[in-house]
Image: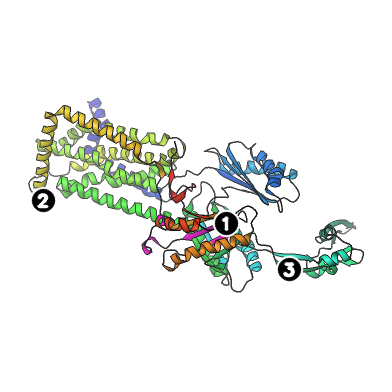
């Protein structure tokens, strides 16, 4: 007798009937776990497929690309090559600067890799020329697009004063935001002291430029000169003859009685421009927030917007303009998928009612939807996944799958009731009959979606969360179907037929289905041949389809890139950039473009980048791809520096139009 009781306790359907409160509590625990996990799950656009990257950059003023490559880039490249976990190295030597992008193998901790890279670079830093400055290591691809871009301007402050304020008060604040790798400044011009030498006076005093340069090196003269000690105190002696004003520099002696002021004009002024930035034709300073690899764009954007509001209150004399924010598109995409999820749930419940015919009977399988979907959030948190477009799409797809098992169990219990069994007996026997069928269906679905996670390269990492969430939701739904559904169905009354508003339509469908089955069975070989032809035709059509990892996206932002001939200066590229702006102005006037953000000389003097934020999707008549198609011809016809317009994509992979294709 005790063995029979133990067997009954181990049987899930019988436990659901004899202990319905326990089953309800277990399902409520799944829901509570999912609700509790919401606060700990991050929201992002796509799963974390960022490759661990670090950028090492250095400045070598006046160095040619060949000299930079020999004296700087090759030594830094050899240093980073000794770091463990390096997958690839991409080095670039330009006039006056070197940039090395190091990509590490998946799974490498970015912080540990950055620390090891700093140690390796510091070992060879003494081997670099003395003129090399600003050797920096950034935990991101320095060529990457900024996730948030903004401009700073002022009517009352000069460009030099504004640059100092941005570098000392603004940029450090943005760097403290978690996930920010760097804040890139463009259009800044520091306040420097200029010494303009008069060649005639220089030759009349029989001096050379190196003589003047050697004298100017004495301007920051501050050296320790020992100390004075007594029984009661100790004084440190410091020789300080630093020249900080234009008059003091002018009084520096070059040779004999000849001073700097005798042969040159000394004054403070802005440094030579390294880049030019305009917003709708107005000179501004651009700030671009670069995120670290494997960080969250939405979280960075939220912090930047909060900090921006505080900056506006703290610096009323400055004008801040947000030119682009990638998180805006991500938030809109996530909201759209959430709306689709809600609509899917409503349609699934309505479809259940159409075919079941009773609201009370419809609610039983419908209860599997919230338990499985909310329980999947706990699974997302436990596996370290995130709420993103793909995981939400997995939940949308799972909505139709998770009610299948509940419908099978519920309908089989109702069938047993119609055969004369009581409520409790019908619930136990009906569930036992389909128990292994439900388990087999769940195992098959999990076996289909779980292998997606093992796809190689970016595709596998991209769809790992999709397959895991979908399989997890189906497994949870099978538990609900075998526990909660029989417990609730045993409380329902037996369905009465003939009063459903769609009964006649359903009977017509049943008759049509019966006729089709007879025809198929009477012509089995013909049916088999037709199926083979359809399969072969599908395989042939598949070969003709285009393949791509991501489709083209309308992210509401167009980027324009132009490269001029080697050796041209900023003024030449600035004139070309104004021609590009003239091409864009008609779209600004027609309301398609929000603003024009131009950066000339971001990395090289012969490079121009223009970021064109578009109006909101509801406020414009043309899509991003249509506008790019219209701009492509006139931008490509600009003499000296033909430009190319393109859009970005969710993976931040370089490609025209935002689509990323496969190559075989």
Name the residue tied to disc 3. 268
Labels 1, 2: front one = 1
* Element type at mark 1: loop
Residue 90 against residue 43 in the figure, above or below: above
Asked whether residue 437 is in view, the answer is: no
Distance (Cα) linking label 1 and label 2 = 73 Å
The residue under label 2 is: 501
Secondary element under disc 2, as helix, strand or loop, is loop
Q: Earlier in the sequence, mark 3 or mark 1?
A: 3
**Magenta highlight on residue 607:** yes
Q: Where are the magenta residues, as a range?
A: 598-625
> Looking at this rendering, what residue extends furthest in the bottom direction?
156
Could you tell me how far apart the alpha carbons at marks 3 and 1 are, in whole angstroms?
A: 35 Å
Q: Nearer the viewer, residue 640 or 73?
A: 640
Above/below status of 442 relative to 58? above
Whether the magenta-drawn stretch holds residue 117 is answered as no
> Looking at the image, which is closer to me, 586 or 126?
586
């Amino acid at each position: 007798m005790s063995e029979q009781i133990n067997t009954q306790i181990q049987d899930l359907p019988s436990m659901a009937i004899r202990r319905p409160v326990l089953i309800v509590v277990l399902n409520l625990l799944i829901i509570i776990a999912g609700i509790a996990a919401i606060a700990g799950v991050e929201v992002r656009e796509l799963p974390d497929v960022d490759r661990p990257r670090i950028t090492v950059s250095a400045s070598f003023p006046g160095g040619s690309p060949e000299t930079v490559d020999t004296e700087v880039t090759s030594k830094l490249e050899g240093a980073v090559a000794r770091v463990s976990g390096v997958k690839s190295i991409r080095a670039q030597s330009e006039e006056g600067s070197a940039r090395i992008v190091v990509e590490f193998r998946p799974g490498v901790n970015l912080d540990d890799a950055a620390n090891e890279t700093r140690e390796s670079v510091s070992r060879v830093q003494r081997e670099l020329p003395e003129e090399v400055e600003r050797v920096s290591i950034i935990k991101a691809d320095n060529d990457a697009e900024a996730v948030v871009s903004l401009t700073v301007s002022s009517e009352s402050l000069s460009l030099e004063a504004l640059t100092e304020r941005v570098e000392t008060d603004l940029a450090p604040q943005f760097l403290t935001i978690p996930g920010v790798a760097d804040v890139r400044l463009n259009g800044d011009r520091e306040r420097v002291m200029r010494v303009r030498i008069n060649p005639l006076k220089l030759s009349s005093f029989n001096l050379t430029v190196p003589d003047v340069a050697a004298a100017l090196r004495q301007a920051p003269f501050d050296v320790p000169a020992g100390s004075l000690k007594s029984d009661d105190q100790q004084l440190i002696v410091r020789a300080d003859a630093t020249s900080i004003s234009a008059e003091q520099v002018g009084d520096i002696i070059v040779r004999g009685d000849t001073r700097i002021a005798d042969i040159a004009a000394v004054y403070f002024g802005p440094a030579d421009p390294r880049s030019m930035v305009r917003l709708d034709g107005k000179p501004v300073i651009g700030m671009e927030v670069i995120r670290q690899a494997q960080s969250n764009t939405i979280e960075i954007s939220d912090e930047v917007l909060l900090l921006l509001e505080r900056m506006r209150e703290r610096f009323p004399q400055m004008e801040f303009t947000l030119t682009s924010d990638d998180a805006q598109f991500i938030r809109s995409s996530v909201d759209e998928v959430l709306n689709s999820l809600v609509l899917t749930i409503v349609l699934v419940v309505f479809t259940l009612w159409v075919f079941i015919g009773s609201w009370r009977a419809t609610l039983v399988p419908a209860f599997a939807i919230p338990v499985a979907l909310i329980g999947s959030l706990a699974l997302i948190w436990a596996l370290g996944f995130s709420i993103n477009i793909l995981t939400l799409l997995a939940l949308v797809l799972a909505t139709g799958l998770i009610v299948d098992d509940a419908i099978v169990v519920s309908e089989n219990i109702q069938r047993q009731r119609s055969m004369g069994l009581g409520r409790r007996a019908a619930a136990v026997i009906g569930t036992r009959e389909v128990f292994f069928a439900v388990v087999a269906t769940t195992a098959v679905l999990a076996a289909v979606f779980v292998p997606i996670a093992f796809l190689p390269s970016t595709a596998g990492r991209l769809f790992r969360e999709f397959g895991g969430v979908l399989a997890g939701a189906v497994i949870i739904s099978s538990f609900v179907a075998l526990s909660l559904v029989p417990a609730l169905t045993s409380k329902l009354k037996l369905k009465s037929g003939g009063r459903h508003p769609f009964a006649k339509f359903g009977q017509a469908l049943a008759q049509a289905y019966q006729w089709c089955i007879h025809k198929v069975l009477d012509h089995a070989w013909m049916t088999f041949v037709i199926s083979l032809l359809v399969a072969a035709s599908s395989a042939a059509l598949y070969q003709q389809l285009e393949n791509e990892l991501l489709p083209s996206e309308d992210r509401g932002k167009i980027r324009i890139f132009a490269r001029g001939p080697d050796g041209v200066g900023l003024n030449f590229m600035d004139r070309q950039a104004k021609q590009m702006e003239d091409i864009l102005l008609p779209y600004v006037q027609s309301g398609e473009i929000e603003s024009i953000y131009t950066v000339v000389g971001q990395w090289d003097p012969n490079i121009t980048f223009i970021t064109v934020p578009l109006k909101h999707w509801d406020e414009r008549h043309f899509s991003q791809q249509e506008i790019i198609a219209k701009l492509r011809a006139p931008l490509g016809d600009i003499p000296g520096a033909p430009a190319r317009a393109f859009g970005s994509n969710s993976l931040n992979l370089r490609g025209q139009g935002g689509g990323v294709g496969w190559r075989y």
